[in-house]
Amino acid sequence: MNRTFRMVLTLLAGAALASCQPVRPDAAPTQLPRIVAHRGGAADAPENTLEAIRLALSHGADAMWLTVQLSSDGIPVLYRPADLSAQTNGHGPVAQATATQLAALNAGWQFHDAHGDYPYRQHAVGVPSLRDALRAIPPGVPVFLDMKALPAAPQAEAVARVLTEEQAWSRVTLYSTDAAYQAAFARHPQARLFEPRDTTRQRLLDVLLENRCDGAPIPRAPAAFEWRRDVTVTEAFTLGEGRTKVSATFWTPATVACFRQQTGQDLMAIGVNDAPTYRDAACLGLDAVLTDSPAALVPVREALSKRPLRCDAPSSR
């Protein structure tokens, strides 16, 4: 059996174990995971807007996760997709519009509620600057900034300038799926960065596929990765190849135990949007979860906080 085929079987086994094998009852944590509003709570309001931030705070979110790009005049703004038409009534890349032009767009144009209505087409919300967002968030609320634009250096310097002027370095942690941002922020010793995503992914896979646990290469740097992610595995044959799609769960008792070998590393699960998954994340002892709807998940945490967390019982999923 070659390694690629074994990887399929191992990922499938890991996903199954994570959904049916609870943590020992004596390992139940005393503190529930913090709730981080993904893009300000993208399911509750237009993502990455001041309106989303306001609602997430009112719903009781513990922290904000916001997405940053750079305007044509070098101002960090909050927006995620590659084209403005994905979320706004504008079109074209963010980098081709000034911050003033972006603020005049309606970032809620494409947002629709559970009934299929578009409430923000009559109540416009603009694309905000990073500076405006930091000023709208109380100083005690942690902020995670996800860097989305390339090249990395100009955006890193623009963000660093805002964080310095707003005295916000101590409450901000920086994240990116692109390793170039690690190097771009290296010249700022006060910058707090997540462990590189490639490193986190490799560490998780080493545990799941090889039963090998290596220590954190950057002590105390937080680690974030999806709770569950679709993976395509390619098996090479002499005559062609086979592909298998797997829905793999990455945070399991084994992976968490590995990451916990060194103290001080916060662990965050991305994409936790329902009560059973939040309960499982709590039983694993994760520090935080990233959710699209603080409005839905905060009541789940409140309900769990009123009784002892029973990790010996199977999840309802």
Image (tube, rainbow, N blue to C red):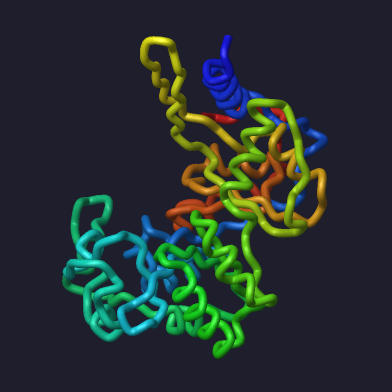
Q: Quadrant of residue 101?
A: bottom left
Question: At 60% across and 81% down in the image, what residue appears?
Answer: 168
- Tell me if residue 245 can be seen: yes
* Residue located at (42% from left, 67% from top): 151
Q: Indicate the quadrant containing the N terminus: top left, top right, bottom left or bottom right.
A: top right
Q: Residue furthest front?
A: 238
User: Camera-side residue: 111 or 69?
Assistant: 69
Give the mark count: 0
Q: Nearer the viewer, residue 190 or 299?
A: 190
On screen, 4 above or below 227? Answer: above
Residue pictured at 44% horizontal, 78% vertical: 130
Q: Nearer the viewer, residue 256 or 150?
A: 150
Rendered location of residue 72, percent (x, y) = 30, 79
Residue found at the very far bottom of the displayed protein = 165
Residue 143: horizontal and vertical position, in percent? Answer: 56, 70
Would residue 33 be found to the left or right of residue 238 on screen?
Answer: right
Which residue: 74% across, 49% down?
216
Q: Quadrant of residue 80?
A: bottom left
Q: Is residue 40 visible?
A: no
Q: Position of residue 278 (x, y in %)?
A: 57, 44
Q: As drawn, is 12 to the left or to the right of 220?
A: left
Residue 226, given in percent of the width and then of the height, sits at: 53, 44
Residue nearest the observer in this picture, 208 or 27? 208
**24 versus 179 height, above or below:** above
Position of residue 257 relative to residue 245, above or below, is: below
